[in-house]
Image: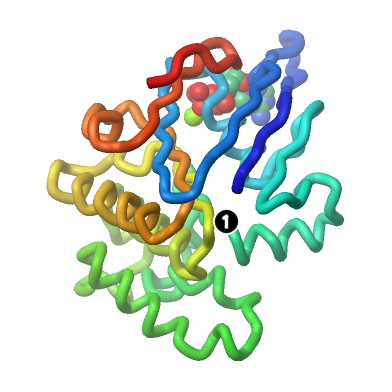
């Protein structure tokens, strides 16, 4: 479903180049949650961005359902992303001037009219599932960090994508909410989805199907 083939990405800064991702190949299967672990700065976020069509690698190919996403035009890639990929950013990137409900519905704005019909109901279902019912009309800066994290996850799920990429989705959650998010991702995978999460949370590593480790831009071991 998602296939990374010999991906490399370096950043050129004032202090020279940093090889953030160094020749990584990885295949992610449906019905599987893969947990990516590794020390800060080893390249996890860079790998996730490249996998999600948000950052073109210097080398290598990323294919989603057999389609090489970086050979598409920017417009086609954006459409593919909206339809097929839910992304949860480490810093959430919620729109500060939109309510919880409207933030969750942002990805539906580019849907065709028929797909938009029940998007409000889908958003309300996610709101309920993530315990945000009494925050429906709040703005992001009126929310706790954990609440923002759950809004970001609901937004990632609203279009029923096939693939969810999430950067530390339980990093700011208490026990009960972390369980809620991990359950939601497990259910999503059980229903046929593909999930890759960056997580240091041992609860995630323990319960999911596959854990991969990254050091210095490379994948090392797999459990
Ligand atoms: N936009 C950027 N410009 C320059 N260097 C960057 C940029 N983003 C990340 N890096 C560097 O690339 C390396 C990997 O970063 P990142 O992918 O964010 O790692 P992780 O998510 O594992 O902490 C780090 O050394 C980081 O400083
Ligand atoms: Mg990171």
| Residue 186 relative to residue 19: left or right | left
Which quarter of the figure has residue 45?
top right
Q: Position of residue 163 (x, y in %)?
A: 52, 53
| Residue 114 relative to residue 192: left or right | right
Which quarter of the figure has residue 200?
top left
Q: Closer to the camera, 146 or 118?
A: 118
Q: Position of residue 155 (x, y in %)?
A: 45, 63
Q: Residues within 10 Å of mark 1 (few under 14, many from 20)?
A: many
Residue 90 appears anywhere in the view? no
Residue 35 appears anywhere in the view? yes
Q: Quadrant of ligand 1?
A: top right
Q: Which residue is mark 1?
A: 85
* Residue at position x 25%, y 62% in the image: 130
* Residue at position x 59%, y 15% in the image: 218
Q: Position of residue 177 (x, y in %)?
A: 19, 50
- Kind of element beneath mark 1: strand
The colour scheme is: rainbow
Q: Closer to the camera, 188 or 82?
A: 188
Residue 152, compared with residue 222, is above or below; it is below
Q: Position of residue 11 (x, y in %)?
A: 73, 22
Residue 67, compared with residue 217, is above or below; it is below
């Amino acid at each position: 479903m998602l296939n990374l083939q010999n991906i490399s990405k370096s950043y050129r800064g004032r202090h020279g180049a940093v090889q953030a991702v160094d020749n990584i190949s990885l295949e992610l299967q449906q019905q599987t949650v893969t947990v990516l672990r590794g020390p800060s700065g080893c390249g996890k976020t860079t790998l996730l961005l490249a996998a999600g069509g948000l950052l073109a690698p210097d080398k290598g190919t990323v294919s989603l359902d057999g389609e090489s996403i970086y050979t598409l035009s920017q417009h086609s890639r954006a459409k593919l992303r909206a339809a097929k990929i839910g992304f949860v950013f480490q810093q959430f990137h919620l729109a500060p001037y939109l309510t919880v409900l409207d933030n969750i519905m942002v990805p539906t704005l580019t849907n065709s009219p028929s797909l938009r019909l029940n998007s409000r109901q889908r958003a309300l279902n996610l709101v309920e599932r993530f315990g945000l019912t009494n925050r429906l009309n709040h703005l992001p800066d009126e929310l706790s960090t954990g609440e923002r994290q759950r809004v970001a996850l609901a937004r990632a799920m609203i279009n029923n994508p096939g693939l969810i990429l999430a950067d530390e989705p339980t990093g700011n959650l208490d026990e009960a909410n972390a369980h809620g998010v991990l359950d939601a991702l497990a259910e999503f995978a059980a229903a046929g989805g593909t999930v890759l999460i960056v997580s240091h949370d041992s609860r995630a590593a323990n319960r999911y199907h596959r854990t991969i480790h990254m050091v210095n831009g490379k994948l090392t071991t797999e459990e």
